[in-house]
Image: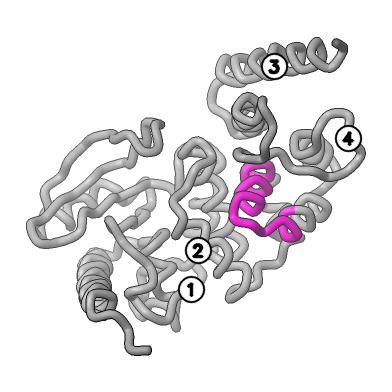
Amino acid sequence: MAPDRADVDARKIAFAQGVMAEAQAIEIIERLAEDDIPVIPWKGVLFRRTLYDDPAERPLTDLDLVAPAADFERAADVLERIGYVSERTARARFGFAAVFERGFIREGFLPVELHRALATGHGATELTRRIFDEGRPAAGIFPQPNVHAPTPEQTLVGLALHFREHGLQMLPYQFDDVRRLLIRLRPDLGHTARLAGEVGALLPLALLLEAAGETEASRRLVLAAPLRWRRATILALTRLGDGGFEPILPGSGTRNGDRLWRLLLHLALARDSFMESARSQAMHGAFLARELAIGRRKKGR
């Protein structure tokens, strides 16, 4: 059966848009290289080269690039010199306020989001510092010498931090990124678990894998984690009163699913060892105590 003409046209358009986005990203990276500014291509910019064979397979709504904090203003100046206009703003995504460091627009091109880290929070800052410090060459992915490519393990943990930043929600194609990453790049889950624990991302990563349908990978990740991080994560992922490892996810059919999902989010934040504010940690801890008390009273009826 011949493909529908509309589907063929849509695929051609998507392919052309993908090629144009690639050219746009390369132009920016090369201009940054001229000023000796390191850069991490992030999310769609990176995944189109590492996870997808066809540019039409991975939609792009913007370009995410990460520059070291010390070079951030110089990177912003480079973008402005080549015709981008800066927009310092925050915009709501999925009902949560998602703040990118600085946005840039240019007529006829995709918006560019310039970041100091892979996501917000101390954990993401620490992970980003490690990627830049390790200086892993990106030969075979990007030929430009200023590109720093995260390892598969760092990429997975970075996605978990991004997942948490957006209130434990992602778009369908972003979950596809996670599944493809596991299949194509085969991250070492033991190393990933240790790294996630060090930057406060073990629980968000376990939840991300569950949400992407990778239940076995989530289980293996948690069991590979050092004991001090494993206990709290297994407790959060297991129904109170049940003996098995049974994750609680939205749409699971439980009447209190939304409340339990919020509980997991607050637990993920309260357990973050890199959290800036003790007051914030106390706030999330108080929420957890209140919710668990409600759960115990209901169970005792």
Q: Is residue 169 left or right of residue 65?
A: right
The residue lying furthest to the right in this view is 243
Q: What residue type is labelled 2?
A: Asp
Q: Where is residue 246 in the image (x, y as percent from the top left)?
A: 79, 43
Foreground residue, 265 or 5?
A: 5
Q: Quadrant of residue 112 in the image?
A: bottom left
Q: Where is residue 237 in the image (x, y as percent from the top left)?
A: 75, 39
Q: Element under label 4?
A: loop
Q: Which mark is residue 242?
A: 4
Q: Which amino acid does label 1 sit on?
A: Leu
Q: Element under label 2?
A: helix
Mark 4 or 1, closer to the camera: 4
Q: Which SS type dominates the magenta stretch?
A: helix
* Residue 114 seen by the camera: yes
Instruction: State the quadrant of the C terminus.
Output: top right
Earlier residue among tags 2 and 3: 2
Instruction: State the quadrant of the N terminus.
Output: bottom left
Measured Cα–Cα span from mark 4 to mark 1: 38 Å
Q: Which amino acid does label 3 sit on?
A: Glu
Q: Element under label 3?
A: helix
The residue to which callout 1 is attached is 51
| Residue extent of the magenta highlight | 199-218
